[in-house]
Amino acid sequence: MEFFVLLGARTPRNERGEITFPLVAGTRTNSNASMEEEVSGGWARMGGLRILKQQFTSNVHPSDLIVFVTGGQEPGADASRAENMARALVETFGFDPAKVIPIRGKGSTQGNAESIIRYMVEKKYMKKTPLVLNLVTNDYHMLRAWLLFAFAFYEHHNGTSLVLPAEDIETIRTILKKATEKLAEKKKCDPDAFREVRDHVLSIVRPHLLGELAVQLEPCVVEDIFQHTHRHLLERYAEWLREHPKVLETTKYEYKGVMDLLEGKYGL
C-alpha cells in the first residue's frame, strides 16, 4: 500500500465567496514572524499529485493508493484546508473519495505531521511493512516539511526528540547561510538550487535516522513532477513557481525554520 501526504495549502474565499487555492495569500495565518503575505502551495500541489496518481495507477492497482490531505482552519471558515483540498481532489481532479482522507492539523506542518501519526496509529497503518509515506509539496517547502515529519516520526518511535551533533548542525547552518546569500545576490533561484541544498542537508541528517523511523519518507516535489512530464507549459509553470519573488523571499524563513528545528527552538 502506498500513502501520499498532500501538505495543506491556504484556501481563502474570494470576493464572490468561492474557495480559492492561491500561490500567495494576501494575509498571513502562520505563527512565524515572516512576511505580511503567506506563500502557499495553491493548485500546484494538487496538480502534481494528480500526475503522481496517474503514474502510480498505471503500474499498481488504484486500491493500493491512499491520500492523506492535511491542513488547519482558515479564519472564519466552516471547513478546514484539509477538507477543502480533499473536496477539490475529488470534484476537480477525479480522485476516488474513498481514498482521499482529510486530516485536520493544528495549522502548521508540524501539527499536520503529528495529526497524521495519530491517525495512522489509530487505523493500525503503522504496523504495515514496508511503510512508505510520499510527501507532496513545493520545492521551497520540502526541506522543512521532510525534516518536521522525520523528527515527528522519530519522536513517536523512540519517545524522545532527535538531537544532532553540534558539528552537523554547524555544517547545515553554513549550507543554508550560503544558499540564502546566493538568493539575495541573484534575486532568482537556479532550478537545481533547492534540490542541491535539500540533498546536502538530508545527506547529513539521514544517517541519524537509519532504523529509527517506522516509515520511509519520500520527497515528491511538485516542480520536479511538472518538469518530468516534458510538457513545455508545465515546465514553464515549474520555473515560474521556483522563481516567483515571494517564493524566493519566503525561502529564507523556511531555512530559518530548519535551523530552529535543529536547535530545538521550533515553535518557541
Image: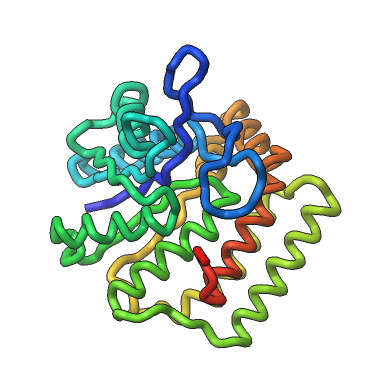
Depth check: 179 or 134 in front? 179
Q: Eyeballing the image, is 16 above or below 127?
A: above
Q: Is residue 120 visible?
A: yes
Residue for point 64% across, 51% down: 34
Residue 132 is drawn in which quadrant?
bottom left
Residue 110 in the figure: left or right of residue 41: left
* Residue extending farthest front: 76
Residue for point 61% across, 56% down: 254
Residue for point 62% across, 28% down: 232
Residue for point 34% across, 39% down: 82
The image position of residue 36, as x and y in percent, is 65, 41
Depth check: 44 or 40 in front? 40
Residue 262 is drawn in which quadrant?
bottom right
The image position of residue 259, as x and y in percent, is 60, 69
The image position of residue 18, as x and y in percent, is 43, 18
Its colouring scheme is rainbow
The image position of residue 229, as x and y in percent, is 52, 36
* Residue extending farthest right: 185
Residue 241 in the figure: left or right of residue 178: left
Q: Eyeballing the image, is 253 above or below 243?
A: below
Residue 184 in the figure: left or right of residue 265: right
